[in-house]
Image (spheres, rainbow, N blue to C red):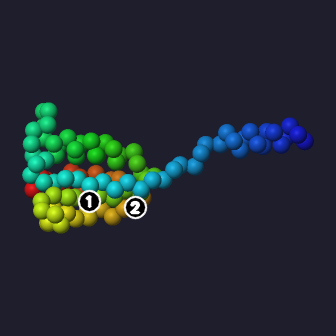
Amino acid sequence: MIVAAIIAVVTFLMRPPDPVRVNIGLIVDISGQMDKRFGDSTRFDAAIANLIDFVGPRDTDNLGLWTSGGACGGAGSRELVPIGQGNSDEIQTALRSLEPM
């Protein structure tokens, strides 16, 4: 009886943990400053490439995408993809469609 209880406790403790879901808001600067050179490309191209890689494996997290650029509260600031789960493909598509102002 004691052995069965110990096995049950050990089995419970060894189970994989539930995944932790986090909320991540991505804000991309699309101002003209992002057109400046950064290594072999531009600041903008480097940021987009890294964000696409970052978003790829995060289907269990809640992700959202916004842009910022231009004057404060200007036309460059908008929500592209509302925060939600399982939208990494939508965010990657939106990222690929962006251009600096």
The answer to whether one can see residue 47 in this image is yes
Looking at this view, name the residue that lies furthest to the top: 39
Tell which tag, 2 or 1, sits nearer the viewer. Answer: 1
Q: Are marks 2 and 1 in contact (CB under 8 Å)?
A: no
Q: Position of residue 47 (x, y in %)?
A: 22, 44
Secondary structure at badge 2 equals strand
Secondary structure at badge 1 equals strand
Question: From mark 2 to mark 1, how far is it between C-alphas?
Answer: 13 Å
Which quadrant of the rendered structure holds the C terminus?
Answer: bottom left
Q: Position of residue 15 (x, y in %)?
A: 65, 42
Mark 1 residue type: Trp
Query: What residue is disc 1 on?
Result: 66
Q: Quadrant of residue 49?
A: top left
Closer to the N terminus: mark 2 or mark 1?
1
Q: Residue at x 28, y 46 (%)?
A: 51
Looking at this view, name the residue that lies furthest to the right: 1
Query: What residue is disc 2 on?
Result: 84
Q: Residue at x 79, y 39 (%)?
A: 7
Asked if residue 99 lies left or right of residue 9, the reply is left
All told, the count of numbered labels is 2
Q: Position of residue 74 (x, y in %)?
A: 14, 66
Q: Residue at x 40, y 61 (%)?
A: 84
Q: Position of residue 12 (x, y in %)?
A: 71, 44
